[in-house]
Amino acid sequence: MTYMWGLLGPGSLPSERRSRTLGVAASVRLFNELAVPGLGGVWFGKQLLLATLGVKVAGLVSPSGGAPTSIETANAIEALACWLDLQSRGWQPDSRLRGVNKMKGQSDLAFRLVREPKFYVTQPMRMSTVEALPALGLVNAGGTRFNSFECSDAGDIFVDAACEDWRPHNRTVVDHLVRWASSSTHDSMTTSPLHMALSPTRALPPRARALLIERLVSGSGREPGDSRQRRRDALAWVDDVRTHGSVFPSWDERPAQITSLQHWADLRAGARFLAARDAALEVLDTLEASMATLGAGPRYSLRDPVPGAIAQRINALRIKARVFLTEAHRDREANVFCRECSHTDDVQVLHALVSRDARVLRLRGDEVVPGPAFQAHGTGPASADDDPGADAAPGSTRAVWPDGVSFRVRNLFLLNADLHGELDPWLAPASTQQATNETALVEAV
C-alpha cells in the first residue's frame, strides 16, 4: 500500500469520510514544513496566480451590495479557469484541472452562480496556497485565514507580469474580472485572451515565472532565516535533478545542495515517521478486512489470539516505528506514537491504534467494533487525513528520490520545472490517471 504525504488515496468515497488522523496530523504537517518551508501544497505556478487574483479582485469590488469574500472570488476565478480549459479540451481531464464531472453541462457563467460552492469542487486548489501566498510575500496576511489576505506590492507585480499580454475586450484581466464580480452579466467570459491568461494548463509568461523563482528564493522577509535557507536549498536540489539528472535514492548520501545537516536529518526522520504511520494504517485496514468477513455484527475481541496476517502487519509496523525512534527527533507526538507502535505486545499495539482511530474502527471495552466509516461489504484502504490544505503532484516525476521523501520535495520539483517552461514532459504519462483519481476525491459530495 502506497501513501503520499497529505494526499488522499485514490478510490471512491462514501458519505462518511474514510480518513484517519491517528492523532498525528500535526506531526505530518511539521515534517512537511521542515522539508520545504512555506510551499504548502503548490506544485505549479498558475495555482498561485489564480489565488492571488482572487485576493486582488475581491479587494477591488465595490463593497456596496454585498461584496464577495476573497474565498468566494478566488474559488470563482479558479472554477472559471478550469471551465474554460475543460471546455476547450472537450472535457478531457488533466491533473491541473478540477471539476471535470461537476461542471460539465454548466453553461451559465454569471459570477453569482460560479461563486456558489455547488458550482465547483469542494476542495479547490486555492486551499493549497494558504500557506504559500504569505510565505512568498504575494499577500499581506492579517491572520492565517484566506479571507484575511490583502494583495501585497509583490502580488500586484506578479499579477501584472502574468496578465500583461492579455486584454479581454481591451481591458486588463483584473478590470475584466472586477466587472464580472460586480455584475450579473457574463457575456464576455469566454474570450480567448481571458482563457489564455487564466488557463491552468498554460505556463506563466517568462517574466512572471522569473518573479516566482525570486519569491521562492527570497520569501516575504518575515520568515525565519532557517526557513528561507531550507527552501533555497531544496530548490537548488530539485533544480540540479532537473538539469543534470542527479538523483540520491538513499538516505545515506546527502546532496551537496542541502547545506544543513539538520535539514537532511529532518527530511530523513519525516520519511521514516510516515513509513511507520502508513504501516499503522495497513494494520487497521487488515483488521477491518478481517472483521468485514464476519457479516452481521462484526467485532474482534482483544482477548482472542491475534490472527497471523494482522500479526505480520504489526511486526512490520514495529520495525518501522523503532527505526524512526533511532532518529531521536524532537517532535513529541511522533515519538509517543512510535513508542506505542513498537510495543512488544501485539494486543497493546492494536489497542493503541484502534483508540487513535475511532472513525473506521473503535473500542467498546475489550472489543473492536465498527465505527461510522466501517465498510461491511469489502473494504478499500482508508486514507491518511493529514492536511485539508495539502495538495500533491501527479503520481511520479520519473526522478528517483530517497524512499518516502516528503511530497513537498516532489511538488517543488514540478513547480521548478513549470517555472522553467518544462512541466508538461514531466507530467506524462501520469497526468490522466492522476486526474481520474482526483475526480473521485475532490468532487465527491
Image (cartoon, rainbow, N blue to C red):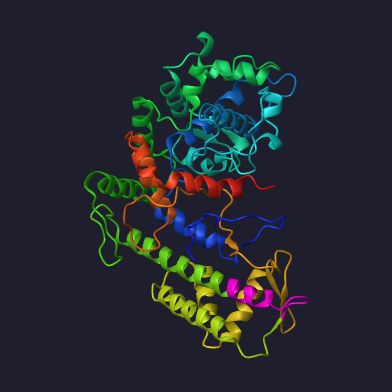
- Residue at (58%, 61%) from the top-left corner? 383
- Residue at (49%, 82%) from the top-left corner? 315
Q: Is residue 330 visible?
A: no
Q: With 360 as the anchor, is 199 left or right in this view?
A: left
x, y (%) of residue 337? 54, 73
- Compared to residue 58, the image places residue 348 above or below, namely below
The answer to if 71 sits in the magenta stretch is no
Residue in front for this viewpoint, 87 or 246: 87
Q: How many marks?
A: 0
Q: With 73 as the anchor, is 136 left or right in this view?
A: left
Q: With 233 as the anchor, is 148 left or right in this view?
A: right
- Compared to residue 153, the image places residue 414 above or below, namely below
Question: What is the quadrant of residue 370 in the picture?
Answer: bottom right
Residue in front for this viewpoint, 69 or 346: 346
- Compared to residue 16, the image places residue 225 above or below, namely above
Question: What is the quadrant of residue 45 in the picture?
Answer: top left
- Write the start and end of the magenta stretch as one range: 284-299
x, y (%) of residue 195? 51, 22
Among all residues in the image, which is located at the extreme front? Answer: 90
x, y (%) of residue 355? 66, 74
x, y (%) of residue 207? 35, 25
Q: Is residue 123 visible?
A: yes
Among all residues in the image, which is located at the extreme right? Answer: 297
Residue in front for this viewpoint, 13 or 142: 13
- Compared to residue 61, the image places residue 123 above or below, namely below
Residue in front for this viewpoint, 376 or 30: 376
- Residue at (53%, 74%) from the top-left corner? 336
